Image (cartoon, helix red, strand yellow):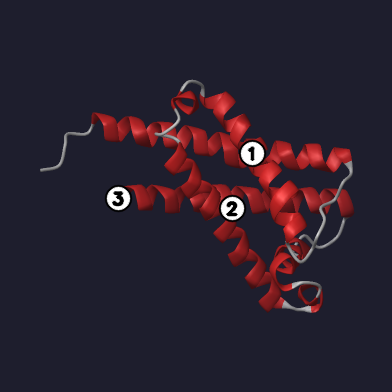
Amino acid sequence: MKKNSAVIARATFLVGTLDILSAFLHYLIASGKDPLFILKYIAGGLLGPAAFSGGAAMQVAGLLLHYLIACIFTAFFFWLYPRLKILRRNRIATGIFYGLFIWSVMNLVVVPLSRIGKFPDAVPGMLINAAILILVVGLPLSFIARSYYRKIRKAPPLH
């Protein structure tokens, strides 16, 4: 279990970092505004509109919440992977599926239930956000999990 936790922690850091950097870049290109606003938006999901008038503390809260969410999705994937044989058939398809799953859960469940209440509904933005989640979260997790579970299957049993 200790090895599993270390892999999940490293995978969380990787996909969480890739995801937030992608969000920053997308926001900067799309709006020309300070991408650190994204962190306040994330904090706003938990803390409401007050997060938007907060300073660095709200940005830190948003970053921590972002990594917590990334950890939950990563741990869930590592729990699910050995239980669903279909996930082991095709790394690419699995990564695409899981990226779309994350997009769906976040935008159709988490954000509507949050203190933000809605997500941006412009189709180009939705497609870009889904593509980002596929490329920087779903695919890396699929490759990392496959590699991890192949290694532990080949490892000699512990006595």
Side of 74 where 43 appears, left or right: right
- Quick one: quadrant of the C terminus? top left
Q: Mark 2: give few (<14), some (14-19) or many (20+) Cα within 10 Å.
A: some
Q: Is residue 39 left or right of residue 150?
A: right
Q: Amino acid at mark 2?
A: Thr
Looking at the image, tell me whether mark 2 or mark 3 is earlier in sequence order.
Answer: 3
107 horizontally vs 84: left or right: right
Closer to the chain start, of discs 1 and 3, is 3
Crowdedness of circle 3 by 10 Å Cα count: few (<14), some, many (20+)? few
- Say which mark, if any, is on residue 17: 2
**Is residue 109 shown left or right of residue 72?**
right
Q: Quick check: 121 above or below 68?
A: above
Q: Position of residue 130 (x, y in %)?
A: 72, 39
Residue name at image x 77 percent, y 60 percent: 35
Distance Cα–Cα, label 2 vs label 3: 24 Å
Tag 2's secondary structure? helix
Answer above or below: position of 37 versus 28: below
Q: Which residue is mark 3?
A: 1
Chain-order first, disc 2 or disc 1:
2
Q: Marks 1 and 3: CB-CB under 8 Å?
A: no
Which residue matches tag 1? 101
Three-letter amino acid code at the position of disc 3: Met
Q: Secondary structure at mark 3?
A: loop
For the point 64% across and 49% down, which residue is it?
A: 19
